[in-house]
């Protein structure tokens, strides 16, 4: 199965989120998007997953809730290794790696509260 994920996340601080996705989950920067000389968004990728991290413009309030009810990420990487890497970079896991419904998975949240589930493909 070839999985592909593309998501757009609006965040409080684009630079903080880019660093988190790079350091904690191993994403790389594909492209920076500026408007008027100001960094507005960054395209990132990791394997078959691509995300666009966009700076919140504050129009809906600076402290509005983000990230509730979202679950992302299917990977062919070793989930236990990714969890170890995430913790080494300061992430707190919501759940440790475990077998869940035919997948190996763990859960964590990014700096804005986006809930991420990192899981392997379903085993036959």
Image (spheres, rainbow, N blue to C red):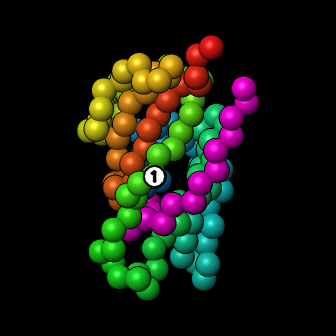
Describe the element under mark 1 as helix, strand or loop.
loop
* Residue 13 seen from this side: no
Magenta segment range? 1-16
**Where 49 falls versus 76 (above or below)?**
below
Identity of the residue drawn at 47% across and 46% down? 71
x, y (%) of residue 7? 59, 54
Identity of the residue drawn at 43% across and 44% down? 116
**Rendered-image quadrant of the N terminus:** top right
Label 1 crowd bin: few (<14), some (14–19), many (20+), radius 10 Å: few
Q: Going by the image, does 83 lie left or right of 75?
A: left
Determine the image quadrant of residue 111.
bottom left
Identity of the residue drawn at 39% across and 48% down? 115
x, y (%) of residue 47? 64, 34
Based on the picture, tell me whether residue 74 belongs to the magenta stretch: no
Number of callouts: 1
**Rendered-image quadrant of the C terminus:** top right
Identity of the residue drawn at 60% across and 38% down? 46
Determine the image quadrant of residue 122.
top right
x, y (%) of residue 24? 40, 38
Residue found at the far top of this picture = 124
Q: Going by the image, does 101 lie left or right of 77?
A: left
Based on the picture, tell me whether residue 13 belongs to the magenta stretch: yes
* Residue 35 seen from this side: yes
Q: To which residue does mark 1 refer?
A: 70
**Where 88 falls versus 21 (above or below)?**
above
x, y (%) of residue 13? 39, 65
In this orientation, which residue lies closer to the viewer: 64 or 58?
64
Determine the image quadrant of residue 58.
bottom left
**Where 116 falls versus 96 (above or below)?**
below
């Amino acid at each position: 199965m070839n999985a592909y994920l593309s998501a757009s996340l609006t965040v409080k601080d684009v630079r903080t989120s880019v660093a988190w996705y790079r350091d904690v989950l191993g994403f790389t920067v594909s492209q920076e998007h500026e408007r008027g000389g100001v960094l507005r968004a960054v395209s990132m990728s990791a394997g078959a997953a691509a995300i666009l991290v966009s700076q919140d413009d504050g129009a809906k309030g600076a402290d509005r809730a983000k990230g509730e009810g979202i679950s992302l990420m299917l990977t062919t990487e070793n989930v236990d290794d990714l969890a170890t890497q995430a913790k080494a970079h300061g992430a707190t896991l919501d759940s440790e790696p475990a077998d869940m419904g035919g997948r190996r998975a763990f859960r964590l949240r990014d700096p804005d509260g986006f809930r991420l589930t990192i899981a392997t493909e379903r085993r036959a």
